[in-house]
Amino acid sequence: MKFKSIEKEKIKKGIYILPNFFTLMNLFFGFYSVICSIEGNFRIAAISILIAAVFDLLDGKIARATNTSSRFGAEFDSLADLVSFGMAPGLMLYLWILQPLGRLGWLAAFLFMACGALRLARFNTNLDQPGDGYFSGLPIPAAAGMVAVTVLFVLDLGLNPEIIRYPILFLTYMLSFLMVSTIKYYSFKKVDLFKSMNFNVLVSMMLILILIASKPSITLYVVALGYIASGPVKYFLWHSRKNDQQEDLISAGKIKD
């Protein structure tokens, strides 16, 4: 029994090629996004972050499906996420639109990255994790994805940066707060990409892909905004329902006011 436990521990500490290759691609596109932001190519920088998010989604799915999860992979994934979804979007925000705000601008970009690091550290130590398919706080890839699709949305509509600079600043602070909050967000971990699915699900996925292909920036922006808003909406609805139940109990005399 002791021998088996030692062998199992060795497997957990192993380095597996396939999932870590996807993590490496996540890191590559995150770094490439930084390069593009420095060069002023913000559209490609935003797209690179979205590609990194796809690789980040796949590495975990593949590791679980092939039973190749490891401590090394988990640590590598977190370090890659900090670059791709902390440093890259923070720098892109600052160089794209926040730089004219001076100290207020770079502090907002730094806060985004710092809150992302705190979010990753809290997740790795399993503090305040609600379970049941939910994350505690906004996941850092989702926050970075919101930043990326916002950049694409603004560039495609040709909006004046002077008009949207302060709304983007507010968005940066809001995303930073949501990452370190305890608001629950659906994790999509129960969605298995490697099992058979209902035909209607396949048709729905096809329709979603058609929508994204027809108006990619608008569709992705709406989807990302909906996910960002889902946490606070669910939180306030839950508290409102809880208060209503308490008022009903008070009126019924079952608990004291």
Image (tube, rainbow, N blue to C red):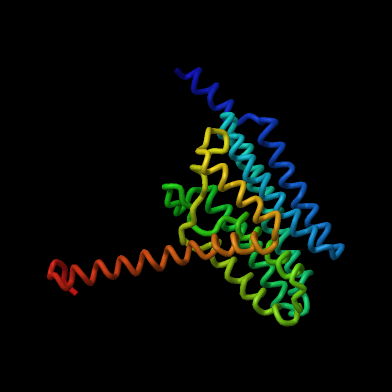
Percent coordinates x, y for residue 151 in the rendering? 72, 66
78 or 230: which is nearer to us?
Answer: 230
> Given the current orientation, which residue lies at the most extreme left position?
253
Question: 102 above or below 153?
Answer: below
Q: Quadrant of the C terminus?
A: bottom left
Return the x and y of residue 16 as percentages of the image width and height.
66, 30
Q: Nearer the viewer, residue 186 or 216?
A: 216
Image position, residue 125 (x, y; %): 51, 48
What residue lies at 54% left-to-right and 47% top-to-bottom? 124
Q: How many marks?
A: 0
Examine the rendering and report whether any part of residue 125 can be seen: yes
**Quarter of the image that includes the N terminus:** top left
The image quarter containing residue 248 is bottom left
Name the foreground residue: 121 vs 228. 228
Can residue 148 be spotted in the picture? no
Image: 101 above or below 137: below
**Furthest residue in direction right, as rendered:** 39
In the image, residue 161 sits, relative to residue 239, either above or below, namely below
Question: Which residue is at a point 53% across and 24% down the rendered structure image?
Answer: 8
The x and y percentages for residue 104 are 69, 78
- Picture residue at 71% right of the left edge, 49% below the top: 52
For this view, does 243 lie left or right of residue 72?
Answer: left
